[in-house]
Amino acid sequence: MATHAPESVAPEGVAPEDVRRVACVGAGVIGGGWVAHFLARGYDVTAWDPAPDAELRLRRLVDAAWPALTQLGLADGASRDRLTVTATLEEAVADAEFVQESAPEKLDLKRDLLARLDAATPPGVVIASSTSGYPMTDMQTDAGGAGRLVVGHPFNPPYLIPLVEVVGGVRTTAEAVAWAGRFYEVAGKSVITMDREVPGFIANRLQEALWREALHMVANGEATVKEIDDSITEGPGLRWAFMGPMLTFALAGGEGGMAHMLDHFGPSLKSPWTRLEAPELDKTLYDAVVSGCDEAAAGRTIADLVAERDQGVIDVLRATGRLPGGRKEGGK
């Protein structure tokens, strides 16, 4: 790990509550989801992506997300007309008061792009990366103004799933991390501000453990794709929508809580159930997972499934009283 000390410069831009213009660099599934979210929260958004058909795909994604966002409740002044797609990265960030980078997960690309963004973005403006795996320490190596670079890790789709994990690298200032965390809250997100870099962050670590187990069960013929998905949606997933795994297990201990749970079930932790090492993704497993998903889709298109997922998330958020708040109300 690099040994740089965090830089001492605090963000010089506007306060999180006063941001009006956001730049989104990278307009794929995640970047486009961020664009839709920020537009729905009433921001002006400039976007850039190097793909020749980026604007067409981006506007199509925003249009597809808009009905769900309308159900959630649009902020005052929210409009798809407030999106501008620029020809260059420099144009996109020229007047930005916050930048969200969502480029593909390639370390060299991230390093180069963050350095370019740092050079082109007005001084003091915080730049966040949507990376799902790389620590900011590894990505900020080529940026002169690395103190303002943070991770703002969302979950798909960013316009619906509230969580954002915020963390800096060794050269990131504490002020930049705090500013980013507050900005996301104002923008209607639920924020975990991490005090240290963790490989895979928090939620991805938990997701990946479940994903590995699922692949092993498919590979060994122990469960079908549909059985695995049903086991979550009809089982623990119903609890996890409002209570996490730790408190859920504490309740399994009855009146004795987690202490009784650990005393009673602790020995089973050594049972050879888990296969946390990733299985070999050979053609047999690949085909089984792909065909299993096709069967589980039962004729529904990707667009159908996206609409079903979005409506399901909205219903869960509504049922649990966690519909995101608008920017004008100042947060969640």
Image (cartoon, helix red, strand yellow):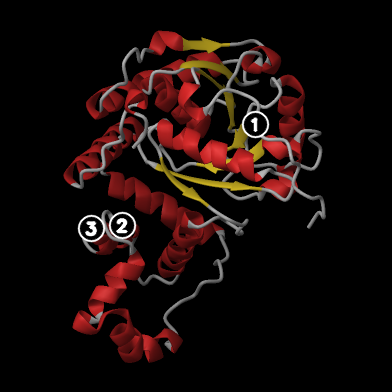
Q: Which mark is residue 229?
A: 2
Decide if residue 39 is in sight here: yes
User: Between residues 272 and 35, which one lies in front from this camera angle?
Assistant: 35
Q: Quadrant of the C terminus?
A: top left
In this figure, which residue is indicated by the disc labeled 1? 11
Q: Among all residues in the image, which is located at the extreme left?
A: 319
Q: Position of residue 33 (x, y in %)?
A: 44, 30
In this figure, which residue is indicated by the disc labeled 3? 238
Sooner in the amino-acid sequence: mark 2 or mark 3: 2
- The amino acid sitting under disc 3 is Leu
Q: CA distance from mark 1 to mark 3?
A: 41 Å
* Vertical placement of residue 265 versus 124, above or below: below
User: Between residues 127 and 268, which one lies in front from this camera angle?
Assistant: 127
Q: CA distance from mark 2 to mark 1?
A: 44 Å
* Vertical placement of residue 102 versus 38, above or below: below
- Per the image, label 3 sits on a secondary structure element best described as helix
Q: Nearer the viewer, mark 1 or mark 3?
A: 1
User: Between residues 29 and 8, which one lies in front from this camera angle?
Assistant: 8
Classify mark 3: residues with Cα within 10 Å, few (<14), some (14-19) or many (20+). Answer: few
Q: Position of residue 213 (x, y in %)?
A: 44, 68
Residue name at image x 50 percent, y 57 percent: 202
* Vertical placement of residue 75 versus 206, above or below: above
- The amino acid sitting under disc 2 is Asp
Residue name at image x 52 percent, y 10 percent: 84
Sooner in the amino-acid sequence: mark 2 or mark 1: 1
* Vertical placement of residue 248 versus 260, above or below: above
- The amino acid sitting under disc 1 is Pro
Q: Is residue 175 left or right of residue 330?
A: right
Classify mark 1: residues with Cα within 10 Å, few (<14), some (14-19) or many (20+). Answer: many
- Per the image, label 1 sits on a secondary structure element best described as loop
User: Between residues 22 and 277, which one lies in front from this camera angle?
Assistant: 22
Q: Position of residue 154 (x, y in %)?
A: 48, 41
